[in-house]
Image (cartoon, rainbow, N blue to C red):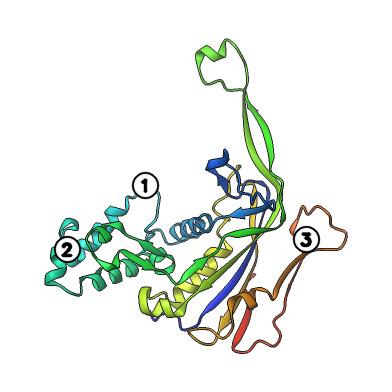
Amino acid sequence: MEPIKNRYDFVVLFDVENGNPNGDPDAGNMPRIDPETGYGIVTDVCLKRKIRNYVETLKEDAPGYRIYIKDGVPLNRSDAEACAYVGAAPEKLKEAKKTDPDIEVKIRDFMCRNFFDIRAFGAVMTTFTKGALNCGQVRGPVQLGFSRSIDPVLPQEITITRIAITTEADADKKNTEMGRKYILPYGLYRCEGYISANLARKTTGFSEEDLSLLWEAILNMFENDHAAARGKMAVRALIVFKHDSELGNAPAHKLFDRVKVVKKPGVVTPRAYSDYSVTVDDGDLQGVECLRKA
């Protein structure tokens, strides 16, 4: 498969209703908040996890579409496959490099060829770094920034109860147990992302087929990830700016400024996506095409 030939910049709008989009383990799993402004935050790692999960669910480890960063699989186990491919033990990579000067390229290409998330996001592979190989860190062409809510959000701490008691001793003292969970009544988030055709060509081989799968995964990243803790989450818009060259024809930040999201007149406290107006200025674009995927 040929690497992509066009640079892309894109904006994703997604929302949460009565849920916690990305809990902070350092704050009792409270939704992440910018303490100075009150705006909600969702990390890039959170969204990448959901994209990986969708691809894994859809492809079910089909050749070329395996996931490197996944639950229950140590990274060293996947790294060992590349070592076996080049015929070198993980602890003997430094010695193997002396006899095979192309071993770094072979290992990198093997990992990129087999794992979708390495082709897309890159990876840090410590097995190869410890073996003094330069292929231990692969920079991926697809990068996501932190998502931020359009308006400040106010987390609510909800007290919950259950009638099942944990221990026999507690059963003699009480008939309910108490718990807590954090939710946001509503929040609309904006994420901005970048796709480098230059890195795709030079490093990972991220292809047009991979790109189509990435758009599909972004649009559906919450559909197979529903949980009581996350509430109702949905991707509301995916706006893509496609450049007609490898390095791009306009600065990304100026393209992002063309996407405006504002509350509709009379709305004080948003509680639905319909409370917002989304506009895209796609006029006077030179060498850039604006595509609405959703």
- Give the mark nearest the N terminus, 2 or 3: 2
The residue beneath circle 2 is 94
10 Å crowding of disc 3: few (<14), some (14-19), many (20+)? few
Whether 148 is drawn above or below 3: the answer is: above
Cβ atoms at labels 1 and 3 below 8 Å apart: no
Query: Residue 263 location in percent, x, y?
Result: 79, 62
Residue 5 appears left or right of 261: left
Q: Nearer the viewer, mark 2 or mark 3?
A: 2
Report the Cα–Cα distance between label 2 and label 3: 58 Å
Amino acid under disc 1: Gly
Dividing the picture into quadrants, the one containing residue 294 is: bottom right
10 Å crowding of disc 2: few (<14), some (14-19), many (20+)? some
**Badge 2 element:** helix
Looking at this view, name the residue that lies furthest to the right. 266
Amino acid under disc 2: Lys
Report the Cα–Cα distance between label 2 and label 1: 28 Å
Q: Residue at x 73, y 70 (%)?
A: 260
Amino acid under disc 3: Ser
Dividing the picture into quadrants, the one containing residue 188 is: bottom right
Tell me the number on the disc at residue 274: 3
**Badge 1 element:** loop
**Badge 3 element:** helix
Tell me the number on the disc at residue 72: 1
10 Å crowding of disc 1: few (<14), some (14-19), many (20+)? few
